[in-house]
Image (cartoon, rainbow, N blue to C red):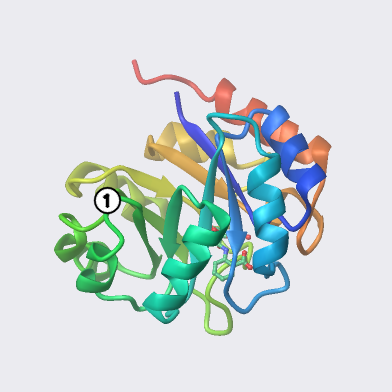
Amino acid sequence: MTRVKVCGLTDAAEAVAVAAAGADAVGLVFAESPRRVSMETARGIVAALPPFVQSVGVFVDEDPARVAEVAAACGLDLLQFHGEEPPAYCARFAPRAVKARRVRSADDIEALRPYEAAVRAFLLDAWAPDAHGGTGRTFDWALAVRAVRELARPVILAGGLDPENVGRAVARVRPWAVDVSSGVERAPGRKDPARVAAFVRAVAAAPEPA
Ligand SMILES: O=C(O)c1ccccc1N[C@@H]1O[C@H](COP(=O)(O)O)[C@@H](O)[C@H]1O
């Protein structure tokens, strides 16, 4: 069964609704973004989540001391590093580190190998010139197929997923999990409950491997 992370929550009631719709994890963005949350808001969201729904902090090239402070204060389960953080940086946060990479070519998949011992999972997102994430752009899923086959850690597929395309993405890539932000929004940082429910349904309905 493919897991679902919904990223970019900014409101505790919406996070609870997203969990009730079937999400396995919610993402809280601490980087520059229209979805950025304060530590206080994040703490409230984490405290409101039901058990067994994980909280994931999203950081971009943040000072590691600040990451440690935020993770402890908010009780984050996993830490998603969405910038140029090197393997040694991620290793400091084992076993909670997830390394995100914005993918343009096969070189981006190869570039993840040195992280294998340091991270719990890889997250593949689309590359964009003007933003680190949350862009709604897809990338060549053939590269994600290769990552699933070749990397020694679970792969989380992200980048431009929505209720309309996620079934095809899951059937083709067979990732450990999928991650969505803008594809289930009514406005940046505000999730549309109907689109979140449709996304979760589409993942569950994706054809299993023969
Ligand atoms: O969501 C953001 O604003 C964001 C900002 C900085 C780094 C990562 C961010 N989100 C991540 O972007 C991907 C893809 O988002 P989308 O579904 O294409 O809108 C997702 O993994 C979020 O974790």
* Residue at the image point whose x is 78% and y is 64% from the top: 188
Q: What is the quadrant of residue 187 in the picture?
A: bottom right
* Residue at the image point whose x is 23% and y is 63% from the top: 91
Q: Residues within 10 Å of mark 1 (few under 14, many from 20)?
A: many
Above or below — where is 142 with respect to 39?
above
Disc 1 marks which residue? 147
**Quarter containing the N terminus:** top left
Q: Position of residue 14 (x, y in %)?
A: 79, 44
Say if residue 138 shows up in the picture. Answer: no
**Which of 48 and 126 lies nearest the eye of the viewer?**
48
The three-letter code of the residue at mark 1 reads Ala
Image check: 103 left or right of 110? right
Image check: 184 left or right of 118? right
Number of residue marks:
1
**Quarter containing the C terminus:** top left
Mark 1 within 8 Å of ligand 1, using the beta carbon:
no
